[in-house]
Image (spheres, rainbow, N blue to C red):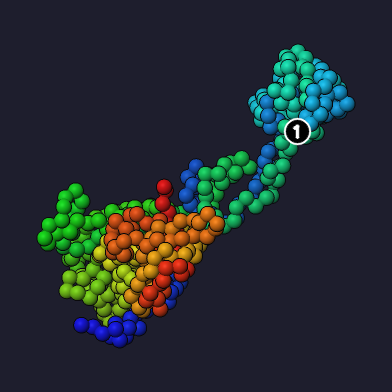
Amino acid sequence: MTSTADAEAAANELTPLADYLGSVLRRLRALPPLDLDLTQAYGNVLASDVVAPHSFPAFDQAAVDGYAARWEDLVGYGPVPSQGPGRPVRLNVVGDLGAASWRPVRLTPGSCFSVAAGAPMPIAADVVVPVEWTDQGMAAVEIFRTPKRGYGVRRAGEELPAGTVLARAGTYVAPALVAVFAATGIGHVVVRPSPRVVIVATGDELVDVGRGSQPGQVVDANSHALTAAAAEVGALAYRVGICDDDPEGLRGLLEDQTLRADLIITTGGTGTGPGDMVRRILSRREGGRAGPVTFTDVALYPGTALGFGTVGAEEVPVVCLPGEPGAALIGFEVLARPAIQLLAGAEPVFRPSVRAHLLETISSPGGLREFRPAHVAERRGGGYTVQPLSGGPYTLSGLAEANGLMVLGERVTTAAAGSTVDVLLLDRRR
């Protein structure tokens, strides 16, 4: 049996996770900017600040359906809303204005226009009386309540004057932001393109989904899960499928994929066992030079063995994750997801986190930074609680159920109930 001292000594030989991530992410650069039509910009990250070329609203307009009038024609006759009913004001209705009206018109004393929401305001009008405050007359209208000056009117540039910085570089283009751009006259924006990510599962033992595993066969869950994970973070994800443990086949496949990939993710074969061909092939020294991918034993639980490097003439980045499904998914969260975010120009590259009160006492392997599936919830009085899920980080069912990953540092061997721990918040649409 291995003693505790031996285990701690082995852990001390591992690379701290923070050091490893820093060394990897410093080698990556955001993808070159791309000018896109506004209809294609959703889901990308802005590469430069966006400034409003025109005001919004572009002109004075009615904010509600009603009657555009001069406030001076209303005061002194109709009551303000807080004063209750009073003598109505009668105005002549001299025309109708809709959102498509474009000819400028002017109000004269004692008159008004019937207007639809979005219609341009007549010159000299400074209030819109809602239809429900009137008798809804057509040739003449009686007004029973007097709004405040400016009620029902949206002034030109009231919300966004021309020259306003609408969004800074690094901002994610969401649907509402698309609307803001369009409303201020923007048809194109400069963005970082969504990274093209290729996922490859390796191993002679792998078979495709749609069947159960047999002795000597393992259903490929990883490439499907990692493709979904890459798509969730906004990448254009392509699942290549299964590659056997064939050196020439793997090299040729990776070389082919560099033509369409900004990042390649492999899963399986990162260890030092007899069947771990990915590490053996991609780290092999050739012509006195180190292999294209460096494999590092990281102080991470689960899955200590991770690989990173570049392949092909274009030097496309490659992230190599373990083959065990739970370790592969944790490895994606820790390494591949930040890499995708960085390529996309997104900030921050890491998931948001909270501090939460632990609901039960748990143990953790010393010397390793553990990421454990958990359920995090907000407390009524403020703050969060976190419940670790049964089975630990290797259980797929726990990962599928989790809405957070509890992070336990290298020096933590026991975390007591009631103590405070860090929790990464996962995207869970439920």
Q: Quadrant of residue 17?
A: bottom left
Q: Answer few, some or many: residues within 10 Å of disc 1's Cα (few below 14, many 20 plus, some between 14 and 19).
A: some
Q: Which residue is mark 1?
A: 151
Residue 28 visible in image: no
Q: Residue at x 35, y 83 (%)?
A: 12
Q: Quadrant of residue 394?
A: bottom left
Q: Residue furthest top?
A: 139
Q: Is residue 7 left or right of residue 84?
A: left
Q: Residue at x 12, y 62 (%)?
A: 216
Q: Is residue 103 left or right of residue 189?
A: right
SS class, disc 1: loop
Residue 266: where, in percent of width, then height? Answer: 29, 63
Please tell me whether residue 352 is drawn above or below residue 365 in the rendered image: above
Q: Is residue 62 left or right of residue 245?
A: right
Please tell me whether residue 429 is drawn above or below residue 86 in the rendered image: below
Residue 305: where, in percent of width, then height? Answer: 30, 73
Q: Quadrant of residue 81?
A: top right
Q: Residue at x 34, y 60 (%)?
A: 389
Residue 207: where, in percent of width, then height? Answer: 17, 55
Q: Nearer the viewer, residue 24 or 387?
A: 387
| Amino acid bearing label 1 | Tyr
Q: Quadrant of the N terminus?
A: bottom left
Q: Residue at x 70, y 30 (%)?
A: 62
